[in-house]
Image (tube, helix red, strand yellow):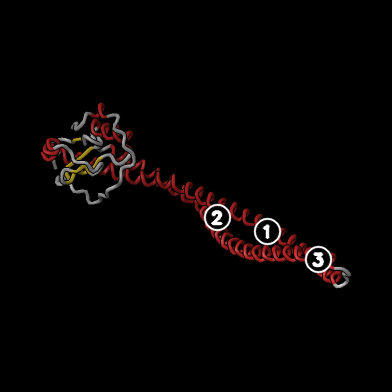
Amino acid sequence: MSLYLEQIRQLVELQHVDDQIFDVKKELSAAPLEVKELTNRFRDEETKLAKIMDKLQHMKEQQKRIDVDLEDETSRLKKSKSKLMQVSNNKEFQAMAREMDNMERNTRTHEEERVTLREEIENQDQALKEVQVICDELKIDLAAKEANLATRIKKANEEFSKLENLRNETGGDVPAPVLARYEFIRRRLDHPVIVPVKESICRGCHIAIPPQTFIELQRGQQIWSCPNCQRLIYWAEHFHDVHQVERKPVKEEITFAEDLNLGESI
């Protein structure tokens, strides 16, 4: 194997370790966020539950007032009907009849309000049951995730420690100048650092590299950087990475292009 291909192999191996480290870091970040997100959802549902309960309490108090008003109006209407039979002249009769009409209208209005209120109370009761079910489910999920959080973090930290040791060993095989270049890019781009070029397309930024750079890359004499994203690149036909999994770049900062020199080789 040529020196060029050996360096590519070493860098790809190092990238694999960094891939695993990247995944562990994601797990360390994601685990607490999952609990936080679930906690926020649970609190939102609790707030919704409290609002429905407050609304129901207000509506039931309103229902009681309407019931009292209806009972009072019905009683007054009965008394007025009894008095109507005792009226001795037409003027008093007309006055009492108008009063009874008003009372009957008020009674009908309150009865309609009571029917509408009962329907709304039934709707709110149903909504309360549905939200309560969601709250109960979220509470169970939250308890499980909280109980599992410490285990997940401990496991991830143990894996991270092992990978850091493995990275030191793997990086020790890479020549110092090449490793320095790799680390320089890693500090700025984060992930990934070295990617293949297929059909003149960089698999890091998915942009075509210049024809001259591609020609130099195919010669397989030195390691080049993508002029667009500054990642280290190699021609896929020179080296086949059986473990290659194309990942979406996490962060791209190209402000350091002058330091890297576009299309620079190692």
Front residue of this view, candidates 233 and 12: 233
Q: Determine the residue positioned at 81% across, 63% down.
A: 95
Q: Determine the residue positioned at 80% across, 67% down.
A: 77
**Picture coordinates of residue 120 (x, y %)?**
62, 62
Q: Nearer the viewer, mark 2 or mark 1?
A: 1
Report if the CB atoms under discs 1 and 3 are less than 8 Å apart.
no
**Picture coordinates of residue 242 (x, y %)?**
22, 51
Q: Residue furthest bottom?
A: 85
Check disc 1 and report the residue beneath it: 59
Marked residue nearer the N-terminal end (2 or 1): 1
**Picture coordinates of residue 133 (x, y %)?**
56, 62
Q: Determine the residue positioned at 19% across, 41% down.
A: 208
Q: Quadrant of residue 73?
A: bottom right
Amino acid type, callout 1 = Met
Marked residue nearer the N-terminal end (1 or 3): 1
Q: Quadrant of the N terminus?
A: top left
Q: Residues within 10 Å of mark 1 (few under 14, many from 20)?
A: some
Is label 3 in a helix, a strand or a loop? Answer: helix
Q: Residue furthest front?
A: 90
CA gap between label 2 and label 1 equals 34 Å
Is label 1 in a helix, a strand or a loop? Answer: helix
CA gap between label 1 and label 3 equals 38 Å
Marked residue nearer the N-terminal end (3 or 2): 3
Question: For residue 94, which numbered disc appears in the image?
Answer: 3
Amino acid type, callout 2 = Ala
Q: Quadrant of residue 10?
A: top left
Q: Determine the residue positioned at 34% across, 46% down.
A: 20
Number of numbered discs? 3
Check disc 2 and report the residue beneath it: 143
Q: Nearer the viewer, mark 3 or mark 2?
A: 3
